[in-house]
Amino acid sequence: MSKQICIIDGHPDPADHYIHAVCQAYADGAREAGHSVCEVRIADLDIPLLSSAEEFAELPPPHICEARDNIARAEHVMIAFPLWLGGQPAKLKAFLEQAARGEFFLGASDEDGGWPTQMMHGKSARVFVTMGMPGLVYRFAMDAGALKALERALLGISGFHPVKHKVHGGIDAVSDDTRKTWLEEARKLGGMAI
């Protein structure tokens, strides 16, 4: 069964980077399998920073609304980013904050003091993270903090399920063959929309 997929390329630099290749491989695999794909490239967007709760309660600028409409239409969302200083690049974080404005990911509770409404219920997600350090060091010595924060504090809490991930560590040191293997894996995952 074909799905609507939204790919969020979270690398803020438009130059040629491995993250862009991962997103392209995932998109190619998805399209080859008959899925519909839309893409949000963080590098192409002007993303203002939020500075108040009042701003967060309002709708974001129109160009951010257009980008988040892709998320709203999608049944599956893929987010890919390089690990920078132990977290997401600031521009990706700023986009997610802007997209969340106006009760997009979480809606008001139906009852006083109750749990917010999960606006993304029924959607699934996949996260790809690349980094210079070995993946095992990130997972065990650093506790995969940025990945867990994204999976739990945004995707999980807003209703995405299941949420899966791939960590590609030591990206600058791996062989071209390993990169090709990882890109082929991304293509296959895109084809399966998982």
Image: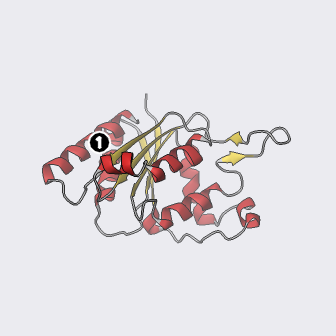
Q: Which residue is mark 1?
A: 187
Q: How busy is the neighbourhood of tag 1: few (under 14 within 10 Å), some, or many (20 plus)?
A: many
- Front residue of this view, candidates 108 and 135: 135
Tell me the colour scheme of the image. Answer: secondary structure
130 horizontally vs 85: left or right = left
- Residue at the right extreme of this rendering: 112
- Residue at the front extreme of this rendering: 141
Work out whether residue 65 can be spotted: no
Q: Is residue 31 above or below residue 131?
A: above
**Which residue appears at 60% of the width and 57% of the height?**
99
104 horizontally vs 83: left or right = right
Q: Residue 30's x, y, as percent?
A: 36, 40
Please name the amino acid that badge 1 sits on: Arg
118 horizontally vs 68: left or right = right
Q: Is residue 36 above or below residue 179?
A: above
Q: Quadrant of residue 190?
A: top left
Q: Residue 120's x, y, as percent?
A: 61, 41
**Which residue appears at 35% of the width and 42% of the height?**
31
Work out whether residue 133 can be spotted: yes
Q: How many tags in the picture? A: 1
Q: Residue 155's x, y, as percent?
A: 55, 44
193 horizontally vs 18: left or right = right
Q: Residue 172's x, y, as percent?
A: 22, 60
Placement of the C terminus among the 4 image quadrants = top left
Placement of the N terminus among the 4 image quadrants = top left
- Front residue of this view, candidates 143 and 83: 143
**Which residue appears at 42% of the width and 65% of the height?**
85
Which element type, helix, strand or loop, lies under badge 1?
helix
